[in-house]
Amino acid sequence: MEIKNITKSVLIFAIMFVISFFTTQVQSAVMKNNNPLLSGINIDGQAIEPAFDQFITDYVLAVDASKETINIEPQTDDPNATAQIIGDTNLKEGVNDFEIKVTAEDGTTTNSYFLHITKGDTAKANVALKDIQVEGLTLNPKFNEKDTNYLVEYEGYIDKLNITAIPEDEKAKVEIIDNENFSSVIHEVTIKVTAQDNITTKEYKITAKKAGENVEDPSGLEQYEEANGENTSQTEENKKAVNPIVVVIIGFAIGTLIGIGIGMVKKGKKK
């Protein structure tokens, strides 16, 4: 009887240990977030252009010529994600490029934001447009200071868009690029603005689509949200889900231990 009791105790302990171990492993694997987004970027209290949006990944900023270093503080949307700043924070004259690489808690999902900081005369570094108009067509979304990607739809056949782009700084240079030879149902036109300092630049995109044809959201946000945002929104559900393969492994391990225990008990009875 004493041997049987010891065998049963050992068996129960072993089963509990296996369950506890595998449960911990499952929780550790499942509960890791896949959110690689930022909730904000703080740069010495200065406003970036355009206004921050976690689905916009490209920004510009002009700083005075006297500024020697820059302090970039990214805030991750998920506190367990990490953000790495790639670039020299000791500013040189002209454009200084930075990448903020965000890695989600799961260690594999990443996303990058890009900063282009121009050091010089800030009054001469204005690359913003105050309006974009396309003759006979409607911008989607309506022109605003935040968006740099727009969509227009046209009927029939066209060779180009009649675009009027008005800079905030009258001395800034505006170039319309790739606005010709519309040979397909989708064509992307670039509006490049160069500040009067001849260093700072910014690009706006207009995707021209033939009416009736399908095209992705020109800003790329819809695609990103489908690929990443939807997964992120389901994180809580994913945390509750248990991988069926892991369940099978746990079941197999418990079954094996029970089998071993029964065998030991039978041997004890024979003795």
Image: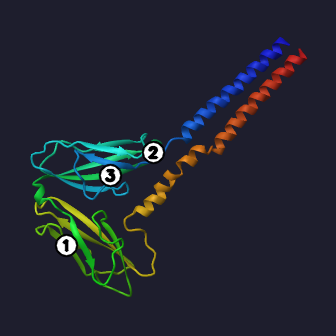
Question: Which residue is found at the position 29% from the left and 49% from the top?
Answer: 99
| Residue at the far top in the pictured view | 2
Cα gap from disc 1 to disc 2, whole angstroms = 42 Å
Q: Residues within 10 Å of mark 3 (few under 14, many from 20)?
A: many
Query: Which residue is under mark 1?
Result: 166
Q: Is residue 244 left or right of residue 108?
A: right
Q: Position of residue 6 (x, y in %)?
A: 78, 15
Question: Which residue is found at the position 22% from the left and 53% from the top?
Answer: 116
Query: Which residue is under mark 3?
Result: 113
Q: Is residue 246 above or below residue 215?
A: above
Q: Earlier in the sequence, mark 1 or mark 3?
A: 3
Q: Earlier in the sequence, mark 3 or mark 2?
A: 2
The reply to whether residue 179 is visible in this rendering is no
Give the camera-side residue of 54 and 223: 54
Query: Which residue is under mark 2?
Result: 108
Q: Is residue 31 left or right of residue 72?
A: right
Q: Position of residue 168 (x, y in %)?
A: 17, 67
